[in-house]
Image: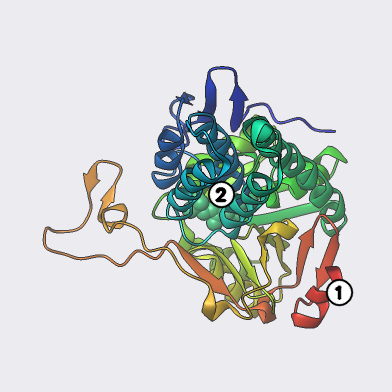
Amino acid sequence: MVGTPFKTIEWTADGIEILDQQKLPTQVKYLLCKDAKCVIDAIKTMMIRGAPAIGVAAAMGLALGARQIQASTRERFLQRFEDLCNQFAASRPTAINLFWAIQRMKAIAHSEPFPFLKEALKSEALKIWHEDIEINHAIGNHGKRLIPPKANILTHCNAGALATGGFGTALGVIYAAFEEGKDIRVFVDETRPVLQGARLTTWELKQHGIPVILIADNMAGMLMKDKKIDLVIVGADRIARNGDTANKIGTYSVAVLAHYHNIPFYVAAPISTFDRNTSSGTEIPIEYRDENEILYCGKRRIAPRGIRAFNPAFDVTPAALITGIITERGIISNPNTHTIEKIF
Ligand code: MRU
């Protein structure tokens, strides 16, 4: 089984270590969080990002924060813990894994005996983390059969080890297929404006020795027309009951292009990314980020002063454009309310 040559996040005796993704690829630096606020800030500023990784970070952050709560009764503890949960819930709105992880931690806080709560919360956070890595391997094993022996794959954003507890979802499928000896080349969309593709996915694939070609986001159509792309695989931040999928801004455009050119378009995501309370993509909350992410490229301003920018961080791809959703329980072909419900 392929290991990940770096740790995205780790629980240590001194606190939570987070690989600072804002500094990649030029610097590989870990941030040591000794309290929950540090973890919340790391999520908000995208030092850690990617739906499953945000869930793992929130679970660990809650366990760390719970340790620092001084309360003599269960009621007082729960009040303070609830407040902490609300702060994590307000960090980023789109990735459902964040709210899913908070719910799991809350369930422990409400069920375990008071004297053992802090230890139980730590165990649950570690469980969420380890489960996530196993789930990614299962997604990889299911998904690898979709990859032909020789394949040019397009991916958008980063859905790899950096975006999860480890290994990755969309990139996990690629790693599993590569491990089997398949001849793979990955075209990576740079993914403006935060450049997760250019900065993170290329870095990650290089660590695994997988051939990578970086492209600007507006080049995918030409490559598809020239028959240079065999399939597309992306991750997901939230999947509605009918299969509509929120993922990094630009995913929808890639899906439309793939549909037009008759190229399979796959989403790889754990079951925890499904939001069964949301019937379709129109109900998924979309995060809007600071306009400076668009107005600047690094430290350099690229638009004249006085120009405003529009910066939605995610878009929704309708289920009709998705060939299949690869989960740890198997592949949902032609996702819709009926085919998705069957997997639960
Ligand atoms: O804004 P980000 O970098 O957190 O967005 C990440 C994505 O859109 C990923 O594709 C998604 O979370 C899936 S990660 C396995």
Q: Local crowd at mark 1 within 10 Å, few (<14), some, or many (≥20)?
A: few
Residue in the foreground of this view, choosing between 84 and 151:
84
Q: Residue under label 2, please give it.
A: 50
Residue visible at 70% across and 50% down in the picture: 169
Q: In which quarter of the image is the C terminus?
A: bottom right
- Give 7 or 81, whichever is nearer the viewer: 81
Instruction: Give the left or right position of residue 78, taking residue 118 as reference.
Output: left
Give the residue drawn at x 61%, y 26%: 11
**Relative to 233, 285 lies left or right:** left
Q: Could you say where residue 44 lies in the image, as x and y percent from the top left?
A: 40, 47
How would you rate the neighbour count of disc 2 (Cα within 10 Å): few for under 14, some for 14-19, many for 20 or more? many
Give, as a three-letter code, the residue at label 1. Lys
- In the orientation shown, which residue stands out farthest toward the left? 306
Report the residue that reaches farthest toward the front.
73
Of the two numbered discs 2 and 1 on the same chain, state the one appearing first in sequence.
Answer: 2
Does residue 78 lie above or below 276 as drawn?
above
Q: Is mark 2 on a helix, strand or loop?
A: loop
- The residue that label 1 is drawn on is 342
- Residue 57 falls in image quadrant: top right
Q: Is any part of residue 320 visible from this angle?
A: yes
Is the Cβ of the residue at disc 2 closer than 8 Å to that at disc 1? no
* Residue 289 occupies quadrant: bottom left
The alpha-carbon separation of the residues under discs 2 and 1 comes to 26 Å
Label drawn at residue 113: none
- In screen coordinates, is 295 left or right of 229? left
Residue 42 horizontal/vertical position (percent)? 43, 39
Q: Residue at x 85, y 58 (%)?
A: 329
Confirm if mark 2 falls within 8 A of ligand 1.
Answer: yes
Residue type, mark 2 in image: Gly
Q: For the residue labelled by badge 1, is the local secondary structure a helix, a strand or a loop?
A: helix
